[in-house]
Image (cartoon, rainbow, N blue to C red):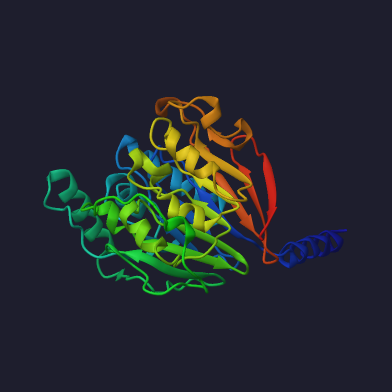
């Protein structure tokens, strides 16, 4: 009987190993900050940002919980899009909780001398990344097993040539332009991540002027499958240039907004006008918006104000055949899409 149990356990293990593994993407609720965890089928991990500092290391703890859910013992690559507190602030605490092998960023902070807070963010980042840091520029590849990662923006610059064949972007005609951003937002490291036919774009808090550089007069990115809305849902109109957003034509948009940060009414209107969009998922209900300017309840991970929020995540699981399933951690509701 004991032998039969052992054989049954071995067979079950072999069955699980034979199951096709997916590329998994977690959008971690860091209360209007940013933290996106990507885990490849072979188990290699890439984390983009780690949310805010403080609050008893709340955001670092939430990132850690996501790594545990993904079965990780370490983070292979941490990409810091830029050095604002809602992106880099949680990284020092996280580095004490789980090993981080490599740090990728756009180069030195341009705001470190502005005040003691930004100076501390920069100093703390330097301390944890020392000897493990890689500076990237547009066009660079970040080595990630099973998936392609191309840097499309960094340090205020964007890629020179289109990633795929592309002509003149019709959405550039009469498109609104804005002044050059002189903050860390405009320096954001943006990446296009590919897995088979599936394409995921995350450009951090890249600003309107740099989005226009990616989009006009020629669309340099091409269409994507899934798009993480820039700057938490185009905060205060600083991001979200329609010429880029509409040219991307994502099937699904994930908005990593906070309860009262991002996804203003104009941002919602821009996203809903994307040709062929199938769904919008939100990390938070945008409490300053009415129901018409929020997605469906089933596609929303969190409804509460920050103090009462449980910090539920959204997750996408991508198969090699191009199908991907988005799941709401709050209610476990899932929806499957087929990459076009």
Q: Give above or below for 11 relative to 87.
A: below
Write the residue at 18% across / 55% down.
123
Give the quadrant of residue 79.
bottom left
Q: Nearer the viewer, residue 119 or 214?
A: 214
Which quadrant is home to the C terminus? Answer: bottom right
Q: Is residue 14 left or right of residue 4?
A: left
Q: Give above or below for 4 relative to 27.
A: below
Which quadrant is home to the N terminus? Answer: bottom right
Give residue 204's position: percent from left, percent from top. 38, 53
Give residue 303's position: percent from left, percent from top. 51, 28
Give residue 217's position: percent from left, percent from top. 40, 65
Give residue 126's position: percent from left, percent from top. 22, 60
Q: Nearer the viewer, residue 51 or 192?
A: 192
Answer yes or no: is residue 219 visible.
yes
Q: Is residue 60 left or right of residue 120?
A: right
Write the residue at 28% across / 45% down.
85
């Amino acid at each position: 009987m004991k032998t039969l149990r052992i054989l049954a356990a071995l067979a079950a293990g072999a069955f699980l190993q034979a199951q096709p593994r997916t590329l998994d993407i977690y959008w971690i609720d860091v209360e209007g900050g940013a933290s996106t965890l990507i885990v490849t089928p072979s188990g290699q991990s890439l984390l983009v940002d780690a949310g805010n500092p403080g609050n008893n290391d709340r955001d670092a703890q939430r990132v850690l919980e996501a790594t545990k859910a993904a079965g990780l013992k370490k983070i292979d690559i941490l990409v810091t899009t830029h050095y604002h507190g809602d992106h880099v602030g949680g990284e020092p605490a996280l580095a004490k909780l789980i090993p981080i092998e490599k740090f990728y960023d756009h180069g030195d902070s341009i705001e470190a001398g502005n005040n003691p807070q930004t100076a501390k963010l920069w100093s703390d980042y330097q301390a944890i990344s020392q000897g493990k840091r890689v500076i990237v520029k547009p066009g660079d590849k970040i080595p990630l097993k099973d998936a392609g990662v191309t840097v499309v923006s960094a340090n205020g610059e964007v890629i020179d040539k289109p990633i795929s064949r592309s002509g003149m972007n019709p959405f550039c005609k009469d498109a609104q332009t804005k002044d050059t951003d002189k903050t860390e937002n405009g320096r954001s490291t943006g990446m296009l991540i590919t897995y088979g036919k599936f394409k995921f774009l995350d450009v951090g808090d890249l600003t309107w002027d740099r989005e226009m550089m990616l989009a006009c007069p020629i669309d340099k990115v091409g269409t994507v499958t899934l798009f993480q809305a820039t700057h938490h849902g185009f905060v205060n109109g600083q991001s979200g240039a329609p010429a880029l957003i509409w040219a991307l034509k994502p099937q699904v948009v994930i908005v990593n907004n906070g309860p009262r940060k991002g996804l203003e009414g104009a941002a919602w209107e821009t996203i809903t006008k994307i040709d062929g969009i199938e769904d919008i998922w939100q990390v938070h209900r945008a409490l300053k918006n009415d129901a018409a300017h929020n997605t469906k309840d089933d596609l929303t991970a969190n409804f509460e104000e920050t103090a009462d929020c449980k910090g539920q995540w959204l997750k996408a699981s991508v198969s090699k055949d191009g199908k991907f399933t988005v799941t709401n951690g709050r209610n476990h509701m899932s929806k499957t899409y087929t990459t076009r």
